[in-house]
Amino acid sequence: MKLHLYNDVPDSLTRRARSFVSAHGIKVDVKSVEEHREWWLERDIPTEVIDRMAAYQQRWGGLVLPPGPKYDGGPKYFDPDAPEGSPAEGWSFEAGDQRTAVPYSFMIGPAGEFGIHSHQWTPLHASVEGWVESLALAHHASMWAKQITKLTGDDVNSITMDAYEPVREVKGLADNWWRGSDSLVAIYSGEAESLSFPAARTALIYSGLDDWGLRGGVEDSDV
């Protein structure tokens, strides 16, 4: 498998995430979706679904990013495969292989959501960009925080969120980030929902942050 520098960073990301991808992303060679188009068409996969997979591959295919703090790091690299669904429920496809033996697949949902599928489909972020932004923010916050506190299960409910605002660029659904006056809070509910296992719900609190630590130069007007 050949490795390449990743130079085609999507401009739909914030400056912080573009810097993260440029500095830490590499690209591996992946097989083209077009090689399997006829095989999928013969199995009644709609053309528009295959077109979505091809567009995803063109933008993200082969991108390897550092592991995130949850989901055993996330996909090993982005590579679409295994479309599934129906006209009634919509069509999803695999976002890329797991890094380790986790009990779910990483999927791109009918509306472009990034999520996991185990006992049920659970969208984590409203887009792939949201997942990448979350990885970038976790990397940034871990570098600048004076303290990182982890809470799990029912203890997550002890966090008082009144003084926090959502971080819009992560496009959070089951997972989300919140910004306070000197701290960032990441709440990961995806495994708890998809596996029907509430104890898996996790919060990471990055505290002791100055303005750079809170935002990394990204303002709301940039999102």
Image (spheres, helix red, strand yellow):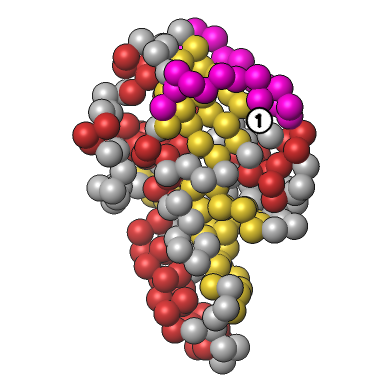
* Magenta-span inclusion, residue 184: no
Q: Residue at x 45, y 51 (%)?
A: 126
Q: Which residues are magenta?
A: 145-165
Q: Position of residue 151 (x, y in %)?
A: 67, 22
Q: Amino acid at mark 1?
A: Thr
Task: Tell me residue 54's x, y (percent).
Answer: 41, 71
The picture places residue 174, in percent across and down from the top left corner, at 57, 44
Number of marks drawn: 1
| Crowd class of label 1 (few under 14; some 14 to 19; many from 20; radius 10 Å) | many
Query: Residue tagged by mark 1?
Result: 202
Q: x, y (%) of residue 137? A: 43, 30
Comparing 43 with 2, the one in front is: 43
User: In this orientation, does residue 100 appear?
Assistant: no
| Vertical position of residue 207 compared to residue 125: above or below | above
Instruction: Report whether residue 199 is seen.
Output: yes
* Magenta span includes 148: yes
Query: Considering depth in this image, is 116 or 140 the residue closer to the camera?
Result: 116
Q: Residue furthest front?
A: 162
| Residue that appears at 36% across and 39% down | 169
Quadrant location, the C terminus = top left
Give left or right: position of 71 versus 209.
right
Which secondary structure lies at badge 1?
strand
User: Which residue is painted at 45% across and 18% down in the image?
Assistant: 163
For residue 156, what is the image quadrant?
top right
Left or right placement of residue 58 versus residue 15 in this view: right
Q: Residue at x 69, y 46 (%)?
A: 193
Position above or below: 114 against 217: below
Quarter of the image for residue 55 reads: bottom left
Depth order, front residue of 67/211? 211
